[in-house]
Image (tube, helix red, strand yellow):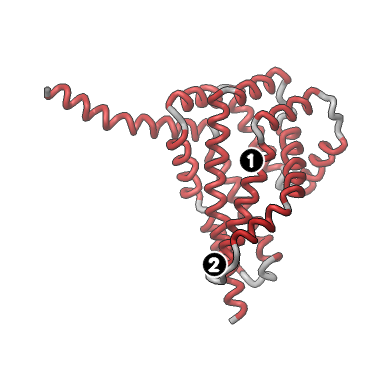
């Protein structure tokens, strides 16, 4: 009896720990910390944009410091980690780790990170967009990028997340002022078509730039993984985690903007 009780206690202790280790291993394979660093840099640029477009540069260093705190790396990481732990099974994490820790998986992740950083430069972004708009759509690279985007439903998912983030931003701005959330959402949905075209442009420009060094066989292997049950689960978990993350961030950004505007009116 004592042996059985000791075994059960050990099982209860080790199982959550093993799950946490799997999640952490997957986070490392996906280079989530590097992704968050890039998002925080983009957040700093967004803070500057908000200063100009909404605040007429009245926010000052205090507002920018607040933006930096909103893009809290630990909290952003925790949100990704919690979604992985909630939604992915052990077998899905094992298979995903096997893929993303492989040479191809690491190459794909690194290429995407490098392309994301590169597109922060307006000149490179314009060049990438020109390459998409004026490029040869009959090439195998374009066909495979197109297939990858369609398989992962990237356009619709990104548009949904963008509308959700904008909705939360304006909700944060209107907090305490009142307003009709339904009317706000309707206004945002009116812009869905233009947002879809902007998203399509960005995604094709991004992936044509990022995946250019890959061979056709590597691209097909990447697409094949995306078609698997594990690939679909990872894709869903990533969108869910970043949707939660940006809903929180944009709501707080809206609040921060509203505070500055309220202070300016006093």
Question: Could you tell me which residue is drawn at 12 percent across and 22 percent down?
Answer: 1
SS type, badge 1: helix
Residue 171 drawn at (x, y percent): 58, 61
Label annotation for residue 175: 2
Relative to 256, residue 9 above or below? above
Figure quadrant of residue 64: bottom right
Seen as rendered, the residue at the extreme left is 1
Nearer the N terminus, badge 2 or badge 1?
A: 1
Crowding at dot 1, Cα within 10 Å, few <14 / some 14-19 / many 20+, comes out as some
The residue carrying mark 1 is: 157
Seen as rendered, the residue at the extreme top is 217
Question: Could you tell me which residue is drawn at 52 percent across and 42 percent down?
Answer: 241
For this rendering, which residue is in front, 115 or 264?
264
Relative to 156, residue 229 above or below? above
SS type, badge 2: loop
Figure quadrant of residue 213: top right
Relative to 124, residue 215 above or below? above
Left or right side of 162 for 17: left
The residues bearing labels 2 and 1 have C-alpha atoms spaced at a distance of: 27 Å
Question: Could you tell me which residue is drawn at 67 percent across and 45 percent down?
Answer: 159
Question: Could you tell me which residue is drawn at 53 percent across and 36 percent down?
Answer: 237
Quarter occupied by the C terminus: bottom right
């Amino acid at each position: 009896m004592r042996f059985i009780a000791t075994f059960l206690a050990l099982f209860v202790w080790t199982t959550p720990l093993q799950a946490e280790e799997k999640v952490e291993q997957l986070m490392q394979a996906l280079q989530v910390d590097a992704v968050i660093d890039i998002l925080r840099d983009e957040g700093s640029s967004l803070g500057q944009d908000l200063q100009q477009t909404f605040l007429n540069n009245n926010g000052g260093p205090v507002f920018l410091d607040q933006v930096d705190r909103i893009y809290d790396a630990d909290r952003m990481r925790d949100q990704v980690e919690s979604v992985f732990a909630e939604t992915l099974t052990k077998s899905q994490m094992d298979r995903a780790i096997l893929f993303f820790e492989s040479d191809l998986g690491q190459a794909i992740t690194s290429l995407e990170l490098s392309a994301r950083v590169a597109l922060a430069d307006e000149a490179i972004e314009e060049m990438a967009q020109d390459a998409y708009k004026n490029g040869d759509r009959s090439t195998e690279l374009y066909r495979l990028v197109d297939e990858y985007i369609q398989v992962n439903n990237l356009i619709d998912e990104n548009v949904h997340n963008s509308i959700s983030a904008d909705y939360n931003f304006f909700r944060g701005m209107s907090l305490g002022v009142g307003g009709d959330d339904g009317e706000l959402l309707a206004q945002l949905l009116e812009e869905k078509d233009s947002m879809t075209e902007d998203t399509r442009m960005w995604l094709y420009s991004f992936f044509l730039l990022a995946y250019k060094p890959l061979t056709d066989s590597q691209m097909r292997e990447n697409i094949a993984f995306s078609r698997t049950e594990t690939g679909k689960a990872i894709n869903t978990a990533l969108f869910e985690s970043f949707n939660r993350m940006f809903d929180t961030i944009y709501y707080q950004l809206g609040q921060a903007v509203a505070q500055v505007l309220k202070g300016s009116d006093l």
